[in-house]
Amino acid sequence: MKTLLTGGAGYIGSHIAVELLESGHDVIIADNYSNSTPEVIKKIEGITGKPIAAHDLDVSDKNSMENLFRENTPDAVIHLAGHKAVGESVNEPLKYYRNNLDCTLTLLETMKRHNVSKIIFSSSATVYSAQGHPPYTEDMKTGECTNPYGSTKHMIEQIIADTAASGWLTSVILRYFNPVGAHSSGLIGESPRGIPNNLMPYILQVASGKLPELNVFGNDYPTRDGTGVRDYIHVVDLAKGHVDALKHCENNTGVEIFNLGTGTGYSVLEMLGTFERINGVPIPHKIAPRRAGDLPETLADVNKAEKILGWKAKLSIEDMCRDAWRSHRNAAPS
């Protein structure tokens, strides 16, 4: 199957590309490299020994997408293109609504014109209502999101559901929890530009001396040590979930939603302590005020994905910390 990955040069997309190629799929990547670099394409090809058709374009641009589909005729799409930082979305909501919705609408319109009817959408646990209590199941209430990033994901889920109800689209929506880690080769990993918004890349910058200390945002949450608890999942496990979702999409119609997590939560301090223990690197930290939009705890119920997709996360928090540090050191200039 020829699969188009929008945002495929990014952190999660690059790992999905590896798993798709190693599962026998042909991969087309569309990315404007706003949070990645073209060098990632060569690294994916180096890991897999297989070629990728990569296109430097903005997914929201209609002419670019029209040309891409006309030249490549994909069989299915995995849609990841979009802005993704929760904190930034609170400060710049218009940027998030404009980009994330435009990318999706342009993509779906182009898919319809070219009779491409299968899409895997990269959604998020942030769609769950702040009034809900973890672990989250796929049938729990969504909306009432605590940040604009989550609201865009919720809106796109609704756009996809309404489009599928019109009769031509089949979709699997995957709600990610907290991806961390990197490919075991160390060749690809998470390398955000500027000061990181997510915990692991922040830890990595402190570990390598680029930042003096880690800000722990809040220690007064109603959790076991007062810091936020998240369901961290190794990015390779997450990527494998997309291969299984694509199989499901091939053999079914309509829309199906799955959580991708481990079902186990770790606090910020627990993740920090594990990183120090596994890698032998101290991580200085200080307590900072809570961030707008953050919840005390997020945790996935993953029974549905295991039952229907046959997918289950296999890698541990130790694997996440070890692989993330290996990748970061490999990427550092010598």
Image: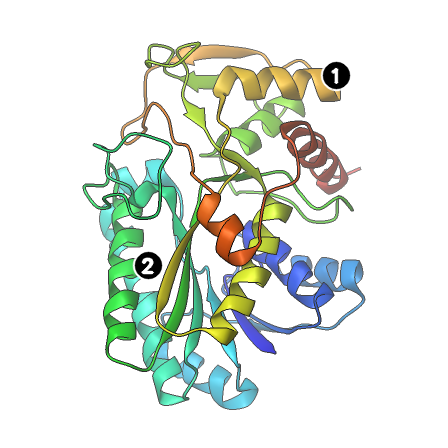
Tell me the residue that label 1 is attached to. Answer: 280
Does residue 227 lie above or below 233 as drawn? above
Is 293 on the left-hand or right-hand side of 330?
left
Q: CA distance from mark 2 to mark 1?
A: 39 Å
Q: Residue furthest front?
A: 307
Q: From the viewer's perspective, is residue 274 above or below residue 117?
A: above
Circle nearer the N terminus (2, 1): 2
At label 2, the amino acid type is Asn
Relative to 292, 326 lies left or right? right
**Residue bearing the label numbered 2:** 100
Crowding at mark 1 (Cα within 10 Å: few <14, some 14-19, many 20+): few
Vertical comparison of 83 with 74: above or below:
above
> Could you tell whether 5 is left or right of 331 in the image?
left
Q: Is residue 111 left or right of residue 203?
A: left
Quadrant containing the N terminus is bottom right
Give the residue displayed 71% in from the left and 40% down from the top. Answer: 327
Q: Nearer the viewer, residue 283 or 123?
A: 123
Whole-percent x, y for residue 311 in the image: 57, 51
